[in-house]
Image: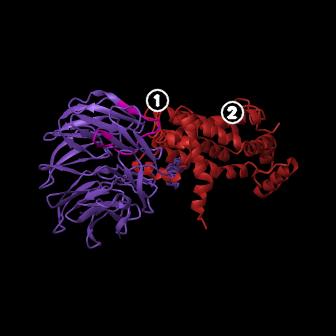
Amino acid sequence: MLSPIALWYLIILEPILNVLVALSHILFGQFGLAIIALTVIVRFVSWPLNKRQLRSTKALQDLQPKMQELQKKYGKNKQKLQQEMMKLYKEAGVNPLGCLWPMLIQFPIWIALYQSIMRALAVTPENLLALHGHLYSWEVVRQAIPLSSQFLWLNLGQPDPYFILAIIVGGTMWVQQKMTQAPSADPRQQSTTRMMTMMMPLMFGMLTLMFPSGLAVFWAVTNIIGIITQYFVTGGWGYLKFGSPFQSTPANGR
Amino acid sequence: MRMRQAKISFLVTILLLGSVVVSCIPGQGQPATGWSGTAFYDGIIYAGTLDGRVVAINATSREVQWHYSFAEPSSGGLSCGQSSVSTAIYTTPVVDGDLVYVGTYSGHVYALTIDRGTERWVYPRTGSIGAIVGSPVIANETIYISSSDGMVYALDMSYGDEKWKSQRLADKLWTSPTVVGDTLYVSTFAGHIYALSAGTGELLDWSFELEAGFASSPVIHEGTIYVGSFDNNLYAIEIGASEPVWEFGGSKWFWAAPVVHEGVVYAGCLDGKLYVLDAETGDKMGEYDAGSPIVCSPVMMDDLLIVADESGDVHVFDLNAEPQDKATLLKAIPIGAAVRSSFCAHAGLVYIRGEDNWIYVVDIDKGQVSQLLFLTSEG
């Protein structure tokens, strides 16, 4: 009987790791291209879930003007506000948590992708030695190891010394968040939202300065694909651009 | 104002927690801790420790003669992910004359006196070169070392002056070079074997290229290079030729350098097997399944071949056995700790640093194991 960790390795981590290594060999020995390609492939495979998540987000966005009205109307009576909001969700056929569960299902895949990148990079001699236990005997995999960590100006095993990736990761994450996060009429909630929109890009920007740049390439590509898919599925820049759904609906609840 | 301060505190806390959580996600690999092996010279065992020191231990009295720390003060911190010993040691100390030479993962080569362990010189005197993983090699009164910056360095043994450094040969060099006469050979992860002038560091005309990378350091015997590869093959390459003489396939990497003795190649493989091959033809004469990856090179002692594996077993073979019996086990002695580091043997005793940071003494004749010293931070 395999332990959960062994199952994790067998079913999720090792297939992703080996595909990543094989892709690196196919893509001219460029591990950076392999990271980009695999991120795109994983995004493509998880597209049905992703689409569902984006549509739920869009549906929630569309409800924002009505939500603002409710907040204005019942702002002081939290219980009533809650009831009215649930009623609104029900009428519109929207599950407020509907955008969460597709994300949760994808989460293990993203963790495995993250771990695969870290393992494949084999930054330390211990990591390289440990890699042999997780590789398939495919010819293409055997030819690919060890991977070259040079990609563009980056050493994928080291943080980007020029801060370019940190700016790209932080910037794209901010854009993506800004596209989805609806402003609130409540000043306190608005302040929290603003802080959250800043916090995640800042955190990931900082992590980019600490972690191997191969991982940052993965984050940057993930964000960029997220922005593109969001743009096309939700039909525009969402709350990012001026004249966003919220701003086109004045706070007085016209 | 207070609200604003609270928000900033919250933001900082989340940033720190986020860093810790992401760095603590299991599965991203192991930090660099080092796997320095043991060297025996004039009754003293020299070994690198997991906390960045070189220790000299009297093999008879089991007392620590001295220890020298390369470790820089730890910065502490919250991260639990890729934190490494500040100066991990992967190289096995090499002794010559009155000095012991060690390369560190921080990119320094140290020469310490063997009597007191005081620093005679350090290279480079300022700054550092790339991380050093392959053990130094001494030949022609020169110390040769390969580095993670992809270059080979030749240093003066007495003063540590740089005699030459090669051009960049690869992304990184983690194997040891081998010197035969006036020529230095080095294998690379990119699948090259380069020949350099040992006197000047200039690239010579001949080089060998393989699609897969080379995992082990090259071993040279009678004009042929024996080297393990990441494509699970062991290659025999005649110097000057463009095609291998033979190749032999295991089922994992040949990470450890093989041993060649009297026309026979003994190659430990990460598939847990010791392969015994005809050095001329590559034909398999026998194989022994140790049952656990063989990470470090076998060692010859008198008429015996000693092999240690990752499960902590020491296997003994008779080098003088008939060809069909060369892979027949004489005895197996469990030491109880994983072995990755190179080890040494002297006068019937084998000195091994286990991954539990103990130095073990294995009496091959009696089949007994004793613990020599636990390499704690206090030595």
Q: Which residue is mark 2?
A: A228
Q: Main secondary structure of the magenta part?
A: loop
Tag in front: 2 or 1? 1
Which region is colored magenta? B207-224
Question: Is tag 2's residue or tag 1's residue first in the polypeptide sequence?
Answer: 1
Residue B131's mark? Answer: none
Tell me how many marks there are.
Answer: 2
Q: Secondary structure at mark 1?
A: loop
Comparing A44 with A190, the one in front is A44
Direction top: furthest residue: B205
Residue A153's mark? Answer: 1
Comparing B86 with A90, the one in front is B86
Q: Residue at x 17, y 35 (%)?
A: B161
Q: Residue at x 21, y 38 (%)?
A: B125
Q: Chain B is shown in which shade? A: purple
The chain letter corresponding to red is A
**Residue B355, x across and y down, in percent:** 36, 61
Observer able to see residue A220: no
